[in-house]
């Protein structure tokens, strides 16, 4: 069996499952956020609610969503509700008069759900995670079967703890070699999606393994697994290794969450529907062009494309390591187009404000370079959101280069705007140049 089949077999109580089988699996965790929501729950300790999408907006209905979740979490006795405010009897209201940059959240607020789940110790190898969000597949970085489900399915899981799943076929991506300077994990997944197209993995598992995969950090693996859905994938999954165990153990201990787990290992005879090897050392900075994540080009082939803005943020591109890679490029220089920075979680805000290079915080390096950094960690303009959302593309005809994960028309606001997906390093170089740029030309 493949890694995905092994996890599903265990969750179904079977010794073996094959691609195409329909099996009832037991959920280990259900995650939901402010856009999707409440039912009567099967296990109050296995539901995690993370408001993150439409939070820092004056839109009263969006604010109300958070209040509904608070009431629901209280009524059901849910332990893991990462509220925006600290007062459990209060109401959430964004105060626009304070501006969009200064933090407006309490001590429990966790930020973007997919980045927050592992940080808060909710991700464990070998388990099953369902989430009401398509990028739930990011947790596959931790050797987990993690997939996005719709609200009807989530309602069923909430009540029963089970879900009927068709076992997906597995596409195998063996990674070899090492990424070269200026090339990032985002380039791996943009390259892979470019190979198979934005629907090339529809209802399939994407398995990443090999020496190149073990060389990647957990942040890098998260970037890759996150975008499995951008090729239509059911899930993305990595092998378990010491790096996986170290992060999971650290985070479960820190947060006092369940700490035991059982990873799955590769079998000798796996059946793949597609099998390829990617030499990481041969990859170059890559861009997914408008209007879908499969429109692959190399950054160096696009330098005549002028840009209106740049954006770094989201679950896939707003981690501490992403901002550090971005800062390395813009350090001591100034961006020449509107550039927005949205850390995925409050913990990342804290990292950037406390990590210092030559006595200066990375946060200051970024703001001095002209990047508009907000402390209000969250999804922000990654999916557009209400019109007052920080970084939203409200005007048609604009082109944005973005470290986010999706670029279908209207994704970041106006349907007439265009989004070009790239790594944080490529976004940074392009922000300095005002056109698509290859970050290798900007590194010392
Ligand atoms: S950051 Fe973007 S992709 Fe990630 S959960 Fe939020 S809206 Fe979705």
Image: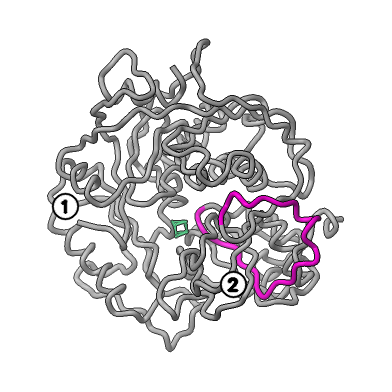
Is residue 353 visible from the viewing direction of this image?
no
Q: Quadrant of residue 28?
A: top left
Q: Nearer the viewer, residue 115 or 312?
A: 312
**Residue matched to label 1:** 77
What residue span does the magenta drawing correspond to? 292-315
**Residue matched to label 2:** 373
Category of crowding for the residue at label 2, using alpha-carbon neighbours closer than 10 angstroms: few (below 14), some (14–19), many (at least 20): many
Left or right, 28 with respect to 191, comes to left
Category of crowding for the residue at label 1, using alpha-carbon neighbours closer than 10 angstroms: few (below 14), some (14–19), many (at least 20): some
Specify whether residue 307 is painted magenta. Answer: yes
Q: Position of residue 273 (x, y in %)?
A: 51, 24
Viewer-side label of 1, 2: 2
Name above or below for residue 239 compared with residue 60: above
Left or right, 109 with respect to 102, comes to left
Real-space Cα distance between discs 1 and 2? 36 Å
Q: Which residue is at 26% across, 68% downward?
A: 65
Q: Where is residue 96 in the image (x, y as percent from the top left)?
A: 41, 85
Ligand 1 under 8 Å from disc 1 Cβ:
no
Q: Position of residue 217 (x, y in %)?
A: 62, 39
In contact (CB < 8 Å): disc 1 and disc 2: no
Q: Which residue is at 67% across, 27% downward?
A: 277
Q: Which residue is at 36% across, 45% downward?
A: 148
Left or right, 68 with respect to 425, comes to left
Q: Nearer the viewer, residue 335 or 277?
A: 277
Name above or below for residue 142 compared with residue 352: above
Q: In which quarter of the image is the C terminus?
A: bottom right
Q: Nearer the viewer, residue 183 or 115?
A: 183
Chain-order first, disc 1 or disc 2: 1
Q: Which residue is at 57% across, 42% downward?
A: 224
Q: In which quarter of the image is the N terminus?
A: top left
């Amino acid at each position: 069996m493949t890694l995905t089949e092994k996890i599903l077999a265990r969750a179904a109580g079977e010794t073996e499952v094959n691609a195409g089988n329909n099996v009832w699996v037991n959920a280990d965790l259900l995650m939901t956020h402010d856009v999707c929501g409440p039912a009567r729950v099967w296990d109050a300790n296995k539901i995690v609610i993370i408001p993150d999408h439409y939070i820092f907006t004056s839109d009263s209905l969006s604010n109300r969503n958070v209040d509904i979740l608070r009431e629901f979490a209280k009524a059901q006795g849910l332990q893991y509700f990462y509220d925006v405010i600290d007062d459990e009897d209060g109401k959430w209201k964004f105060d626009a008069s304070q501006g969009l940059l200064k933090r407006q959240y309490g001590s429990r607020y966790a930020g973007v759900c997919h980045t927050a789940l592992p940080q808060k110790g909710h991700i464990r190898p070998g388990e099953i995670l369902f989430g009401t969000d398509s990028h739930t597949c990011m947790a596959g970085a931790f050797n987990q079967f993690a997939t996005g489900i719709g609200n009807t399915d989530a309602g069923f899981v909430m009540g029963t703890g089970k879900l009927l799943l068709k076992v997906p076929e597995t596409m195998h991506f063996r990674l070899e070699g090492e990424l070269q300077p200026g090339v990032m994990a985002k380039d791996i997944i943009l390259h892979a999606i470019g190979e198979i197209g934005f629907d090339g993995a529809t209802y399939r598992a994407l398995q990443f393994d090999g020496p190149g995969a073990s060389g990647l950090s957990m942040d890098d693996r998260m970037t890759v697994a996150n975008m499995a859905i951008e090729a239509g994938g059911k899930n993305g999954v990595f092998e378990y290794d010491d790096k996986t165990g170290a992060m999971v153990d650290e985070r479960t201990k820190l947060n006092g969450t369940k700490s035991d787990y059982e990873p799955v290992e590769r079998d000798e005879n796996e059946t793949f529907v597609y099998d390829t090897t990617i030499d990481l050392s041969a990859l170059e900075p890559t861009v997914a062009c408008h209007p879908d994540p499969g429109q692959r080009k190399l950054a160096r082939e696009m330098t005549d494309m002028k840009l209106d803005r740049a954006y770094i943020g989201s679950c896939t591109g707003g981690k501490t390591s992403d901002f550090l890679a971005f800062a390395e490029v813009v350090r001591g220089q100034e961006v020449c187009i509107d550039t927005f920075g949205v850390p995925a979680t409050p913990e990342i805000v804290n990292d950037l404000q406390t990590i210092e290079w030559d006595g200066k915080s990375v946060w200051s390096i970024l703001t001095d370079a002209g990047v508009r950094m907000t402390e209000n960690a969250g999804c922000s303009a990654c999916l557009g959101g209400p019109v007052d959302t920080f970084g939203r593309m409200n005007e048609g005809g604009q082109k944005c280069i973005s470290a986010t994960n999706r670029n279908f028309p209207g994704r970041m606001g106006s349907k007439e705007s265009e989004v070009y997906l790239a790594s944080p390093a490529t976004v940074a170089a392009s922000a300095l140049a005002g056109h698509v740029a290859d970050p290798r030309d900007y590194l010392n």
